[in-house]
Amino acid sequence: MKAGFFFFSILLSILAQLSQAQYHYQSLMNYLDSRMAALEERIALWHEQNNRYSNDLKKFRNQAADLLEKLEKEHEKLRDDLEGAGVRVDRVEREMDYFETKNPPKPCVKPEDKMVEQEPVVKKKKKDEFFEVSVCVDIVSSIRAMKILKRLGSTKGLWTKDAMTAKVYIFNGTSEDTLYEFNSVKELAASSGMSKGKQITLPSAWNGTGHVVYNGFLYYVTEKSELQVIKFHLENSSLADSAVLPIEDRESVYNLNPETIVDLIADEEGLWALYAVGDTINLAKMDSDTLDIEQMWDTACSRNNAEAAFFVCGTLYVVYNTRHASRSRVQCVFDVNDMVTPGETPLLYFPRRFGAHASLKYNPVEKQIYAWDDGYQILYRMSLKKKLWAIVPTPEE
């Protein structure tokens, strides 16, 4: 009797545990069902949002395609307008050239009197009171084109071409005694390095980037106990002459290129020298044969923020920049003949490049500038026009 009761109790206990397990199982299933339902709702919402975003993207893509098509049409129209404007400008330039050939400008001389309201007043003087400074009447009107030849050497240097020959010269750095000669620009462009050129060793190291090649001679400045200009015969590799420069202050002529104390420049008129006096740039005309200084000018051009300069037809163009290299521009123009009026002063901006100019050397035969910019050798093609004024004194009977 007791054994039957015991087994009955065990059976009741098992049934109770089964009932409790079924209850927990049902609760778990209900929980899973609710979670699945919530997940399905979220998936449905995601599908809805995805469809909406997809539709919005398709609309945006269609709108962008329409805008691009309109922009392309406007670009084509603008290009046609620019081409038309270019044709008109070319026609005007041809007409100006025609009138200039019919009325050629007279040679420039040094005016003794000021011009008043654009009416030149020429005063009769003795013949020895008039002297011819320049017979060139060109002024730079624009920078027509830029060509990057290659990258060669350090960030600062100079490359130039003798106007009388086809030879090109490379001066790497700001204080060396070896330069490299190439037979042509094409040979330099095809070379793999400076070592492919002819090496020329100088009797002393150059200073800065202010040297110039002129009529087969190299003119450069060396800084010893005295500031000297050296004339070196390039073909014979021999010292031709030297002279002490009468410059008291050894300040850099360009604030942004402190290595250059004197910048020697050649143009159609001969050899010139730029140097600093205080905060301004001064100019001197030099005899290329004797190295004597013939005449000096105070240009009133500031050396602050100046990086380089070039000389064209008796007119100095000083190029300025910022310490954090930006776009170079001409901000000061000085004409030794006093023939450039304020309204004539060109507003010249160089194309955006790599850094700042270390040197600018003008070739009067090719009408282009050889520039060194952060190790890149660059050519700038210049456009020239005639100066407005060319005063000629009345000859005496």
Image (tube, rainbow, N blue to C red):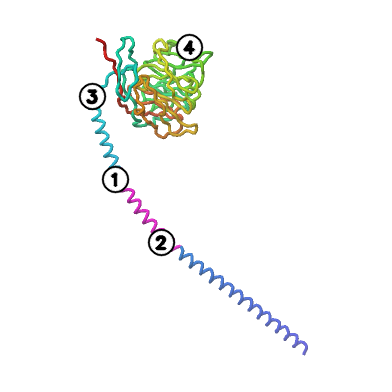
Q: How crowded is mark 1: few (under 14 residues within 10 Å), some or many (20 or more)?
A: few
Verify whether residue 231 appears in magenta. no
Q: What stretch is highlighted in magenta?
A: 50-78
Residue 30 sits above or below residue 115 on the image: below
Q: Residues within 10 Å of mark 3 (few under 14, many from 20)?
A: few
Instruction: Give the distance between the C-alpha atoms of the residues marked 3 and 2, in whole angstroms.
Output: 68 Å
Main SS, magenta region, reads helix
Q: Does dot 4 land on a helix, a strand or a loop? A: strand
Residue bearing the label numbered 4: 244
Residue placed farthest to the bottom in the image? Answer: 1
Q: Is residue 220 left or right of residue 313?
A: right
Nearest to viewer (mark 3 / mark 2): 3
Which quarter of the figure is the N terminus placed in? bottom right
Residue bearing the label numbered 3: 101
Q: Residue at x 48, y 64 (%)?
A: 46
Residue bearing the label numbered 2: 55
Q: Which of marks 1 and 4 is nearer the N terminus?
A: 1
Q: Which of marks 4 and 3 is nearer the N terminus?
A: 3
Q: Does dot 1 land on a helix, a strand or a loop? A: helix
Residue 51 sits above or below residue 274 on the image: below
Q: Which amino acid does label 4 sit on?
A: Val
Which quarter of the figure is the C terminus placed in? top left
Instruction: Give the distance between the C-alpha atoms of the residues marked 4 and 3, in whole angstroms.
Output: 45 Å
Q: Quadrant of residue 290?
A: top left
Q: Which of marks 2 and 1 is nearer the N terminus?
A: 2
Residue bearing the label numbered 1: 77
Q: Is residue 141 left or right of residue 355?
A: left
Q: Does dot 2 land on a helix, a strand or a loop? A: helix
